Amino acid sequence: MSDVAEGSRNDAALVLDELAKCFECDGARLPVLEPTSIRVKRGELFVMLGPSGCGKTTVLRIIAGLEPPSSGEVRLDGRRVQGPSPERGMVFQDFTSFAWLTVSENIAFGLRLRPHDPGEVRQTVADWVRKVGLDGFESFYPRDLSGGMQQRVAIARTLAVQPKLVLMDEPFGSLDAQARWQMQEMLLNLRRESPTTIVFVTHDVEEAIFLGDRIAVFSPRPARLLREFSVPYGVTRDRSITRAAPFIEMERQIHVAMRGEV
Ligand SMILES: Nc1ncnc2c1ncn2[C@@H]1O[C@H](COP(=O)(O)OP(=O)(O)O)[C@@H](O)[C@H]1O
Ligand SMILES: [Mg+2]
């Protein structure tokens, strides 16, 4: 299929086409990703699930344009990714708000990098403060916020510029269980309000099913796509699904896939 045809379709926002990566260090070769092809549909939350060290961050960095692939390519709406771009926003595991900027200034940061109307920026920032539940904290600095609140700032800052694709690298991985649950529910709410294509990396099976539309399960390094799962829930989900039989059965199947038994 040509890139032009792909670009005019609206169900294949992101394509990884035979993407592979091997690091070369001091003459040694470290294979990290075996040739992998994946299609992420527009508006989909696609989870990449795999054990620690398998190569998940490397794949996200390649999609972000921060790292070149060894072979194959990444296409967004049919156009080949060749470097970083504001059309692809990334949220990292470590809280990456700008320490010297307030909550509002952090959220406004990307909006102010391009031609803008100050009144519109103020309105957009106010909208995002509300959406991520940071009302009353607008003039706080990140050091005075909890980890979960700092991650809300990073998510709002990333989404406020309306990227075509959001890359999330274990964004809730360093939060305690209760904050993690709150953040997962907030992310589901955000998706209900404004559909965004998201590639979400995690090593947590329950998180993958609770948030994902589709899940790609990877092997230990070098990452190899073991199996893809479609999650049978819409964007409206609550915690009770995690205790029901279909959820538990999918968890079981994913664990089986991860052990390489299928
Ligand atoms: N820039 C680099 N140079 C060499 N090796 C790297 C580099 N970045 C990551 N690696 C190696 O690639 C492997 C996969 O790392 P990573 O993508 O961070 O895994 P994950 O995110 O799944 O934990 C690791 O063995 C890591 O040491
Ligand atoms: Mg990682």
Image: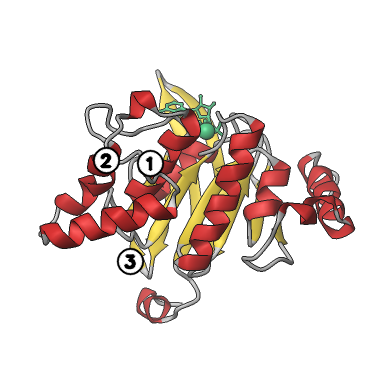
Neighbour class for label 3 at 10 Å: few (<14), some, many (≥20)? some
Q: Quadrant of residue 140?
A: top left
Q: What residue is pinned by disc 2?
A: 106
The picture places residue 7, in percent across and down from the top left corner, at: 37, 76
Query: Image point 27% across, 36% down: which residue?
Result: 139
Name the kind of residue labelled 2 in the image: Asn
Residue underneath mark 1: 154
**How far separated are the C-alphas under marks 1 and 2?**
8 Å
Q: Where is residue 200 shown, x and y percent of the image?
A: 54, 49
Residue 119 horizontal/vertical position (percent): 14, 60
In front of the other: 30 or 151: 151
Q: Is residue 227 left or right of residue 78?
A: right
Helix, strand or loop status at disc 2: helix
Tell whether 141 sits left or right of 208. left
| Callout 1: SS | helix
Label 1 vs 2, first from the N-terminus: 2
Structural crowding at the residue carrying mark 2, measured as other residues with C-alpha within 10 Å and reported as few (<14), some (14–19) or many (≥20)? many
Q: How dense is the environment of label 1, judged by Cα within 10 Å: few (below 14), some, or many (20 and up)?
A: many
Task: Residue type at mark 1: give it.
Answer: Ala
Residue located 62% across and 30% down the image: 52
Q: Earlier in the sequence, mark 2 or mark 3?
A: 3
Residue 57: x %, y % from top left = 49, 37
Tell me if residue 160 comes above or below residue 179 in the rendering.
below
The residue that label 3 is drawn on is 79
Farthest front residue in view: 136
Q: Are marks 3 and 1 in contact (CB under 8 Å)?
A: no
Q: Are marks 1 and 2 in contact (CB under 8 Å)?
A: yes
